Amino acid sequence: MYDFDTAVERRGTGSVKWNAVKEGELPMWVADMDFMTAPEIVETIVKRAEHGVFGYSDVPDEWGAAYRDWWRGRHGLECEADDFIFCTGVIPALSTAVRKLTTPAEKVLIETPVYDTFRNSIYNNGRYIVESPLVYDGHEYHRDWELFEQNLSDPQVTMMILCNPHNPIGKIWSRDELARVGELCRKHHVTVVSDEIHCDLTDPGRDYVPFASASEVCRGIAVMCVAPTKTFNLAGIQTAAVAAFDPLLHQRMWRGLNTDEVAEPNAFAAGAAVAAFTKGGEWLRELREYIYENKRYVRNALETVDGVKLLPSEATYLLWLDVSALTDDSTSFAAFVREKTGLFVTAGAQYHGDGNRFLRMNIACPKSRVADGTERLCRAVKMWRER
């Protein structure tokens, strides 16, 4: 049994999440966990640190093998070790893909509401964004396939950034949905760069489908961005990978990542990833169960609250909360919640689409903090209604 109940003190450690709040405030915003990573990973990092020499590092053969075995064994992806290219993070990989696989002033399609840094990777590199909004039916999200293809048919759209599973809505895309995305993208000559960083954080008994495994068409147009960092809370280690199966796409991404100088590991990056994928399976199993119970706790608590609805969540530890019964200005409401209760959650407007009617809440923390945060949210809703 691993310990997920102990509240780890993160103040004074340079934590982005905790440095953003004052004493008495509770951060449940940015997507990192308040849990210690698997002790097997810590042991590997400590052993490397004790060596005391931190020169330039290579990517060892066991790194590619660990990725291959994890994606083959857990996710059914046919792959080889050399399909994976080391990079320092999924976001650097996305930015490299935008620069290397599109030209200035071309367009990149995203499906909103979606992780906001996608927009930065596009705009900051001189490309235009095409939003293809997902449709919320009051219960869950789906694609408007007619609109989706209409957006893809613009000759200036040459890339799509897919979020699989989708952050912030917690949706696992089915094999059929992904295959249809692949068919339409190939039809309109669009490369799919798939951010799959949340792929291992699915509910117990639920599996995700790697985009490249949905069909041979998908495999031929896919650039998958993957990492152990969300799964094992290793974002600060800066370790990730890109997988591309078409030889030309693979070569272009390898060249782009090396040109951008994000293809060399620090002293801990490769070893931490290997330890995660070869020794972290049981820790992950218990983590998924723990997060699922946190989701159930929040769902049950909110059933008695008029004005907030938790959408069905199949993946990630990020809850997408419908507050449209209270407001269509999630930015003002999130600020109100923080001012009145100290709970820091993210305004859904940040993710565009219909996010102005939602909040995003991170529940990857001990049950005591989940209970505290849920109570603060419920209290804020009552105060909002009584204004």
Image (spheres, rainbow, N blue to C red):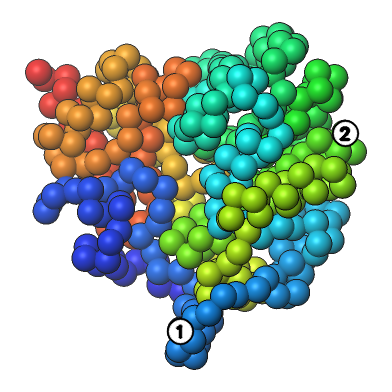
In the rendered image, residue 113, in percent from the top left (x then y), is placed at 49, 25
> Between residues 9 and 365, which one lies in front from this camera angle?
9
Q: Residue at x 27, y 24 (%)?
A: 331
Indicate left or right for 82 with 200 as reference: right
Hey, which quadrant is residue 345 in on the image? Answer: top left
Q: Residue at x 16, y 42 (%)?
A: 342
Q: Say what secondary structure mark 2 lies in.
A: helix
In the rendered image, residue 268, in percent from the top left (x then y), is placed at 52, 74
| 214 w.r.t. 22: above or below | above
Q: Which residue is mark 2?
A: 217
| 276 w.r.t. 29: above or below | below
Hey, which quadrant is residue 140 in on the image? Answer: top right
Indicate left or right for 68 with 311 as reference: right
Would residue 140 be visible to someone looking at this image?
no
The residue most toward the bottom is: 51
- Classify mark 1: residues with Cα within 10 Å, few (<14), some (14-19) or many (20+): few
Q: Give the amino acid at mark 2.
A: Val
